[in-house]
């Protein structure tokens, strides 16, 4: 195998989109470097001109890989899947692939963007209720979908991009004190997935930039 | 070729996510049926129990195809691309595919969800400024990306899912009176794309549910 430069993940320990990419690297067994981008410190390190050159949206993650720089976590994950060996992150069957993408996009377009740091800063005082509202709305849709599609994991019995999206979103739900008792399927899947090594090593409590008081 | 049931698109003439799916069908030359879901009338027909069974997120579009029901426009578009002949909607090269997905997701996760009807209803009186802010923020990131990736279209010289996402988002920008002069690449691509038949026939001004006063 040719010597290759390791991919570089510019991310933040608590960013759910950064966590998605970390899970994908871990599932594939890909070594990567992490460059922490602290979203809080110095008014937000993602706002520097230096970082803007990596991701003009001034969000994490940004990934340098194979000579290109990619942002948008699902684009990164699918690129990794299409270019790297190891367990596939999308199933082979087109209908199952579509279900994986539907679930992933429900979270990545329908929930996460509405409760991310930037939006909550714009919302101000009502931010906790706002975040809870949009996570609940998404989970109320996700629960019946997952009841139909899931086996051991979100779609059947193979881990996929849908699982990669689910776990970090549940983590956010817990941060925002969403009552998860209404979502037994989501809870079950999350619990199962959190026992898997790739989800453990990539967890926000285990990263190089995790503050000491948040380490598990 | 076996007789197949036509796909059914549950959508709304002015929904940018419905328009994305209509463009994909048109580019592929796929005949489909449309069932209008009026997002305004009767307090919103997407909120009925009947529609909720099709898409638990109570958003358009929902597409019945090959015996399954899919929501999330990019999942639908990629399913169509993977199962139907005709011009491909994602390029063959993995890096170009990743760029197409990055641009598509920047719009589908980074812009559209923040200015859709449901969110603007929650925002209330400030909704125009809110929508403008998030579209501008997205376009400020998109412009330098497209300057790098574009040829005749968003990524090189082949029409792709990125173009399918761009045009409806520019339509929304115009509705919300965003000043597009700052975005010459976006403007150029949008103009080129709007001259293509598949973008014309799928346009919000041309749909079965377009009100008479909005017909072009």
Image (cartoon, coloured by chain):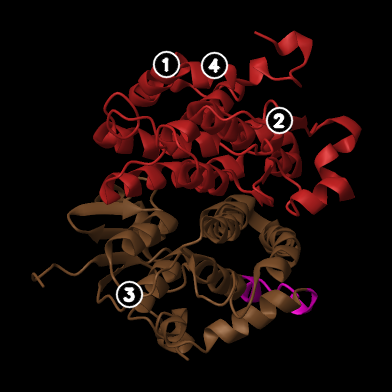
Chain colours: A red, B brown
Q: Residue at x 67, y 26 (%)?
A: A14
Q: Do marks 3 and 1 share a subunit?
A: no
Whether pointer 1 and pointer 4 mark residues with C-beta atoms closer than 8 Å, the reply is: no
N-term-proximal mark, 2 vs 1: 2
- CA gap between label 3 and label 4 equals 43 Å
Q: Which residue is mark 3?
A: B86
N-term-proximal mark, 1 vs 4: 1
- Range of the magenta residues? B173-182
- Residue B31, given in percent of the width and then of the height, sits at 25, 77
- CA gap between label 2 and label 1 equals 28 Å
Q: Do marks 4 and 2 share a subunit?
A: yes
SS for callout 4: helix
- Residue A122, given in percent of the width and then of the height, sits at 75, 45
Q: Residue at x 44, y 32 (%)?
A: A86
Q: Which residue is mark 2?
A: A33
Q: Chain of mark 1?
A: A
- Is residue A133 visible to us here? yes
Q: Residue at x 55, y 49 (%)?
A: A75
Q: Which residue is mark 1?
A: A191
Q: Chain of mark 4?
A: A
N-term-proximal mark, 4 vs 2: 2
SS for callout 2: strand
Relative depth, front residue between B46 and B7: B7
Q: Residue at x 38, y 25 (%)?
A: A183
Whether residue B44 is in magenta: the answer is no
- CA gap between label 1 and label 4 equals 11 Å
The picture quadrant where one finds residue A158 is top left
């Amino acid at each position: 195998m040719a010597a290759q430069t390791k991919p570089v993940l510019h991310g933040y320990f608590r960013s759910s989109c950064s966590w998605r990419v970390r899970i994908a690297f871990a599932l594939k067994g890909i070594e990567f470097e992490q460059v922490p981008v602290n979203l809080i410190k110095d008014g937000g390190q993602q706002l520097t001109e230096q970082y803007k050159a990596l991701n003009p949206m001034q969000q994490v993650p940004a990934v340098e890989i194979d000579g290109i720089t990619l942002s948008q976590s699902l684009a990164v994950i699918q690129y990794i899947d299409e270019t790297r060996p190891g367990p596939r992150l999308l199933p082979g069957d087109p209908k199952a692939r579509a279900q994986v993408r539907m679930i992933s996009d429900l979270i990545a377009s329908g929930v996460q963007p509405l409760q991310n740091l930037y939006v909550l800063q714009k919302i101000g005082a009502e931010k906790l209720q706002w975040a809870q509202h949009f996570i609940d709305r998404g989970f109320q849709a996700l629960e019946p979908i997952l009841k139909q599609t899931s086996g051991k994991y979100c779609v059947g019995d193979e881990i996929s991009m849908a699982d990669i999206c689910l776990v970090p979103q549940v983590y956010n739900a817990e941060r925002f004190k969403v009552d998860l008792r209404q979502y037994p399927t989501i809870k079950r899947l999350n619990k199962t997935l959190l026992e898997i090594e790739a989800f453990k090593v990539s967890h926000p409590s285990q990263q190089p930039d995790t503050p000491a008081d948040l380490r598990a």
